[in-house]
Amino acid sequence: MSAPIKIQYLKGIGPAKAKLFERLEISTVQDLLHYYPRTYQDRRLNTPPNEYNAEALTIFKGRVLRTQQIPARSVLVFKAVLEDEKGQQLECTWFKKRPYRAFRFDPFGQIKKDFHLNNEVWVIGRKNDRGAMFARQITVEEYYVAADALTQLHAGRLTPIYGLTEGLTNKQFRQFMYEALQSSNPADEPEILPPALLQKRRLLTAPQALKAIHFPNSLAELESARARLAYEEFLLLATAWGIKRTQTKILAKDYSYEVKKTLLTPFRTQLGFTFTNSQKKVINEIFSDLLSPRPMNRLLQGDVGSGKTVVALCAMLLAVENGYQAALMAPTEILAEQHYLTFKRMLAGLDVNLAVLTSSTKAAEKKKILKGLADGSIHILVGTHAVIQDNVAFHNLRLAVIDEQHRFGVKQRSKLKEKTAKLDLLTMTATPIPRTLALAFYGDLDVSTLSELPPGRQPILTECATSKLAYDRVREEVQKGRQAYIVFPLIEESEKISAKAVTEEFEKLKKVFPQFRLAVLHGQMKQEEKEKVMADFAAHNTDILVATPVIEVGIDVKNATVMVIENAERFGLASLHQLRGRVGRGEHASYCVLVPQHAGSVARERVDIICATRDGFKIGERDMQLRGPGEILGTRQSGELEFKAGDIFKDQAILHWATQDRDEILSADPGLVKPEHALFRRKLQELYQQNWHLIDLS
Ligand code: ADP
Ligand code: MG
């Protein structure tokens, strides 16, 4: 592979244009070639309807019969009548603002040159009704002189439409792309897929696919190009996962567990409920991982309220029974604090030392905790990502649990991976990875699923209503002795602005509910304040908690039966589902009232889905379809699941091929050392070495 060519060396692109391309993250010719069209327009004549010509765009090719400039006051109008080979005519219109001061400049100058009598042109435009003399008439959006060499890039074909930035046009884009394709050396686009696979799956070669994704000659060719590129993307990621998986398998733990039950038995006896069958099954799965000689890397997925926390606690107790330390990380301080209190309550009387560490733990307290962790006197640490900071040294940490793992940023997670490479790792999430995706990529990654909720859960009635009706519901429930949440969205993703807004709403709500005890909670409050507000609400010292989405994950107050979500359209599906999961946790029937303000179509759709289903898995799948997997799984920055050509939902068949082939490749050549895999391996290295250090392909 030769060195990448900077984009400004492409004909027609200087330093200024190069800057524009940089905004699209295109800095080399290679980047440009891999910037695939956002969509296409079918600009061929007389093609049957398809997904690229459905909109009301007129495409016409004809000779100029006559032209006319129409004088008008503010807007200048130019018209041309074209006639095609069959004798059909089309009237084309251009509107231009009268140029200010520069009277001499003719805004139609170029058009007049190009539309001289009898010249053959392509026009692309939309129907208009303004001053039309003909039945067939359009306002012209683009035109191309038929005899010009580059016209074939823009008209009379399936035409690529790119995602642009200000200062660049599609026309320029297409011409630069063409230039790039012409000037690029085939060796710059080497075929990384082994020939056997190309043949087996009847795939286009890399250069063929690249050319066809930009300038397809037919719909079928476009589909083949997309399939080839999608396949490659899927195969690369699936293989990366496959390798990572084998590597963790080879690692051997230098410690082992024994089920002693010195803590587990008393813990279960005093728990106050029995595990669901699902929990029992999952605990067994986790225990057998812990007892096995290789480190655990298990994902525990279970819907909101399915009881993941006690499962994690069992695993941690097994570690403590064996004289090891365990840590649990939560994405927010409130949640860490709550887990800590829950554990404390559940472990009362047992010989287990707990501590909680967050970024607002006071210096003196922190010092004490760090000491306890270093000398082993603290057995279980609960914390936020403060725990993964470098200065936290454990005596013998063996088990790490990450709660609501998708909430952690990519950086935090990769830091965690560094620290936990040789530990037993349990990650928990209520935003499940859709089954299809999990199977495809994670392959046989260990996934445990809590498929049932603990018994006795009350249904949650989800409804859409106005604020007034929502408040009636709140009043009714609080009068019965229950409690309520009223949640406002984050504003512009800023906790600060949101804090102000929610405080204002809080003042208003105090007037709406003068007879009740209200409290406000937002991310800008001091840790002690937050703790106090949560503790007061848990103890039923307050009736209504007005909050930002800080309460979204994990909060567990059984007496709360109403969740009002204001501006519901501003929340993602997963958030709505999480918020709803804050109620219905006890013996009382519960309500989730969505109060939408401005409902766009996607927003409307989200609200409808939430009202219609309680199944977190289905919601997760829909959310991923609406927002893309990278957004949901928090991998967007690392590009882990960002596919340029592939679509994990539409391309199920290709996904299936890719994972099947991955398994075959890795079983025949686990280290990818065979010559036919050399380029594929190099590509994997390129892609994953920086941001996915766990894959060791050196
Ligand atoms: P999530 O899976 O959303 O993290 P939690 O672990 O917070 O759910 O559990 C929700 C609630 O259900 C907690 O109050 C927990 O104590 C309770 N719980 C968990 N398992 C059971 C069970 N088997 N029977 C009854 N209640 C349970
Ligand atoms: Mg939880």
Image (spheres, rainbow, N blue to C red):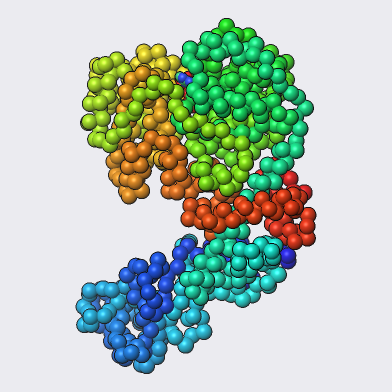
Q: Quadrant of the N terminus?
A: bottom right
Point 78% across, 54% down: residue: 673
**Which is more toward the observer, 359 or 309?**
309
Percent coordinates x, y for residue 426 in the rendering: 61, 30
User: From the viewer's perspective, is residue 156 above or below residue 473?
Assistant: below
Q: In front here: 294 or 690?
A: 294
Residue furthest top in the image: 349
Residue at x 64% of width, y 25% of height: 287
649 relative position to 465: left or right = right
Residue drawn at point x = 34 percent, y = 72 percent: 57
Q: Is residue 491 visible?
A: no
Within the image, what quadrant is residue 496 found in?
Answer: top left
The residue depicted at 53 percent of the width and 56 percent of the height is: 653
- Residue 284 in view, yes or no: yes
Where residue 534 appears, as percent x and y from the top left, is 43, 19
> Residue 409 at x, y = what percent?
56, 38
**Dividing the picture into quarters, in which one does residue 59 lie?**
bottom left
In front: 355, or 55?
55
Give the answer, above or below, for where 628 lies relative to 85. Answer: above
